[in-house]
Image: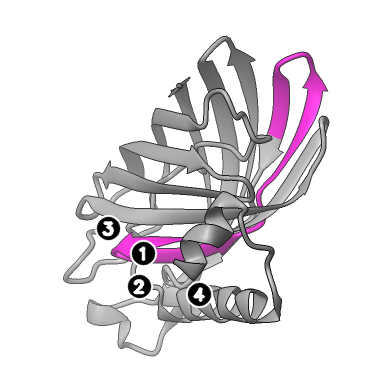
Amino acid sequence: MRFFKMLTGERALDRTDYAMFAVGLVATAYLSLWACAPLASIPPIMPLDREHPNQLSVAVGGGVGVTYPTIFTREVPYVAGAQGAYVHQFKYLDVGAQMSTRNDTFAAVGALVRARLIETDDLVFGLQASGGWMWMATALPLAVRLGEGIWAYTAPSIGYALPEVSIPLGVSVRLPNIDIFAEAGAGLTGGRKGALLLEQNSVEKVAPYGAAGIGWRW
C-alpha cells in the first residue's frame, strides 16, 4: 500500500523511499547477468500525459556483434533483434514491461521502472532501472524538446552484461496518440571470454547499433 500510494502521488517521497530506490539501483547494476538486453532504449522518457498514460512500443534494430560464446550466448558478426515495451505513466514514475529477441542469445523478458526527477515543458530527466531474463541495467534517461512534438532523447546506461556501457541518441516525433522514434548509439562491452565468463583473458569491444520503432498511446 505504501508503494502504491507513492506511485499514484498520494504520498510524498521520504528518505526511506530514496534509500530503498538507491539500494535497488545498486543491486540491479551488481546482479546483472549476460548480454541479453534489448538493443534500443524504448520508449523514450516523456512528460506526463494524463490523458494518454499508457504506451505500447515496438522496434527493430541491429548492430555489430560483440557477444562472446557462453552457454547462454553465441558469437555472431552482427546482432539483429526486435523488441516490445509497455509503459504506464504514474504521477512521478513510469512502470512497464519489456520483451526482446536477438540472434545472439535467448529471448529476454523483464520490467522497467523510471522516475521522472526533473520535468518541464521542454525537458525531462530521470533515473531508470530495468532487468529480467537475463539482464539488468541502470540508466539516466533525458529528453529535450526541439520543436512542437519533436524530442531528442538519450539514456546512457550501465549493466553487468559482460559488463556493458551504452550511449544512445535518438529522435522522437509525437503525433496524435502515436510516437515515432529513431535511435542510434554505441556501447562499450567488456568481459572474460569463455564459457560462463570464467576465463581470465579480459576483452573489450565498441559496438555501434541502430534502431527504429513506433509507439501507440491511449
Secondary structure under badge 3? loop
Q: In the image, 140: left or right of 107?
A: right
Quadrant where the image shows the C terminus:
top left
Q: In the image, 171: left or right of 55?
A: right
Instruction: Using the image as rendered, state which of residue 60 and residue 21 is in the foreground.
Output: 21
Identify the mark nearer the N-term, 1 or 2.
Answer: 2
State the residue at coordinates (38%, 39%).
Answer: 85
Instruction: Using the image as rendered, state which of residue 6 and residue 33 is in the foreground.
Output: 6
Q: Nearer the viewer, mark 2 or mark 4?
A: 4
User: How far separated are the C-alphas under marks 3 and 1?
Assistant: 17 Å
Type of amino acid at the residue the image marks with label 4: Ala
> Is residue 130 on the magenta stretch?
yes
Tell me if residue 69 comes above or below residue 193 in the rendering: above
Q: Where is residue 92 in the image (x, y as percent from the top left)?
A: 64, 50
Asked whether disc 1 touches disc 2, contact meaning CB atoms under 8 Å apart, the reply is: yes
Residue matched to label 1: 135
Q: Where is residue 19 in the image (x, y as percent from the top left)?
A: 63, 81
Quadrant where the image shows the N terminus:
bottom left
Q: What stretch is highlighted in magenta?
A: 129-152
Type of amino acid at the residue the image marks with label 3: Glu
Q: Position of residue 123 (x, y in %)?
A: 80, 37
Q: Nearer the viewer, mark 3 or mark 1?
A: 1
Residue matched to label 2: 33
User: How far separated are the C-alphas under marks 3 and 4?
Assistant: 24 Å
Q: Where is residue 12 in the image (x, y as percent from the top left)?
A: 69, 63
User: How far separated are the C-alphas under marks 4 and 1?
Assistant: 10 Å
User: How far separated are the C-alphas under marks 1 and 2?
Assistant: 5 Å
